[in-house]
Amino acid sequence: MQQRYVSIWFRYLKTDWHTRRAAELAGQPLVLYAPQQGRMLVTAANQLAEDKGIGAGTVLADARAMVPALQVRPDDEALFQQVLHRFGVWFIRYSPVVALHPPDGLLLEATGCTHLWGGEDKYLADITRRLHEQGYDIRLAMAGTIGAAWAVAHFGSSHSIVLSGHEAQALGSLPPSALRIDRPLAERLHKLGFYRIAQLAGIPAAALRRRFGQQLVQQLRCAYGYQPCHEGLQPVVAPVAYQQRLPCLEPIATATGIEIAMRQLLQEMCARLQQEQKGLRTACVKAYRLDGKVEEASVQLSRPSADAGHIMQLLAQKIDGMAPGPGIELFTLEAGQVTDHHPQQEQLWNEASGLTDAQLAQLIDRLANRLGQQAIQRYLPAEHYLPERSVRATTDLAEQPASSWQVPHPRPLNILRRPLPISVSAPVPDYPPMLFKLQGVVHRIVKADGPERIEQEWWLQDGEHRDYYYVEDEAGHRYWLFRQGHYRTHPPNRWFLHGYGG
């Protein structure tokens, strides 16, 4: 399939943006200004101001003298970077790969997208219509290379389609500056009489390189398609490998319509996953509204799955939180995390059990997506001696432990992430204390078991060993205490509470 690119140039992005938000600016000459080298200079002007001889670089005081009724606004470069970025996200409805081309342009990779609009001409016409309705003056072009699309959009007609392989003919009449070369080089070429790109096309590349440098030759080759150039394609939203798109013939504004769209996307996605013997762990549905806002619904699974019905049950719980607003025109389904998934063969007599049971996994998914992922935890043993490092959490039911559980002595039901310091009285060598105080409450010990010595992991940190005691107080509550290091009186040992219960 031949590559197709679209370059979109917002001719008056900044002034059009202000005019949309202030009705009194309509039909008025407008400029934006910013301080430069101690003077206020015009940084952007609308067409009415340009018709009166005011453009970027004009001193603001001179511009006001030329047009007393001139409307002025301060420029904000950071603001318009955000505006251009929002346009990039909005344009995902036309292509999954949208890149910014600062300060006032976008690049779209339209390969395989135009048939959804009935062809390239209708594709560009729809973009033009939508942006004109929003009040933006644009020029755009489609070509087989990024360089050709940009050149024709900025120096050609306002609505151009260059057929693949015809880039040389489309670029021939344009000035060399359309190749996106440095301004000094463009001025040098102009002084030497090179007014059209066609004049450069017949000169051998070696001669051009020797006379004008590598940049001119490289930009010519990229624009003609003689070598691939993807310097402008840094997507606003990185495309994922597993994504399904569903454009809507009419805007969707009901929960039933959203559910139907989700179900169709899931069926297409799961059919692909089953064919490739893969399953998804995370799924995110994005709904692109007519007003530019994006609604999202995402779910996370405890094990890879390609079961469209189960995943739909999880997503259905999120529909009420999606506001369609004036209507949704595009749905996308992204599988952010995909892993190998080989469906288990069903047994005739014996039923699956334990963590491999598909019904159990689906139950965990429903609970986790309703209550929150933090409400359900699974722990696996970790190869460490210190209790706080001996377990690790996982959200994958299919993950197998790297080692078996090693518990030579009883452990409390609750182990603290960080031991709490306590104060003790009447300690005896190799014996637990008679009582200890925790948060102002005194606990008198009536039963104890220990000690259990656990050494520090010298390859991770230095420190003294720990002597653990399992104790019970007068109220029957059990605690897991430890002394840091060998028994000593000066300075006294430090004691900690590390767990309770059991």
Image (cartoon, rainbow, N blue to C red):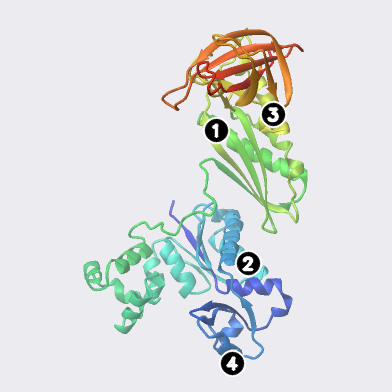
* Crowd tier of the residue under label 2, counting other residues whose Cα lies within 10 Å: few below 14, some 14–19, many 20 or above: few
Can you tell which of label 3 and label 4 is closer to the viewer?
Answer: 3
- The reply to whether dot 3 and dot 2 touch (C-beta < 8 Å) is no
Q: Which residue is denoted by mark 1 in the rendering?
A: 273
Can you tell which of label 4 and label 2 is closer to the viewer?
Answer: 4
- Precedes in sequence: disc 4 or disc 1: 4
Question: Could you say which is closer to the camera, residue 429 or residue 266?
Answer: 429
- Precedes in sequence: disc 3 or disc 2: 2
Question: Disc 4 marks which amino acid?
Answer: Met
Helix, strand or loop at label 4? It is helix
Q: Which residue is painted at 60% across and 92% down in the image?
A: 65
How much space separates mark 3 and mark 4, taking CA atoms? 68 Å
Left or right: 129 with respect to 114? right
Question: Disc 1 marks which amino acid?
Answer: Leu
Question: Could you say which is closer to the camera, residue 151 or residue 209?
Answer: 209
How much space separates mark 4 and mark 2, taking CA atoms? 31 Å
Question: Could you say which is closer to the camera, residue 306 or residue 14?
Answer: 14
Q: Is residue 287 among the parts visible in the rendering?
A: yes
Q: Which residue is denoted by mark 3 in the rendering?
A: 375
Q: Which residue is denoted by mark 4 in the rendering?
A: 66
- The reply to whether dot 3 and dot 4 touch (C-beta < 8 Å) is no
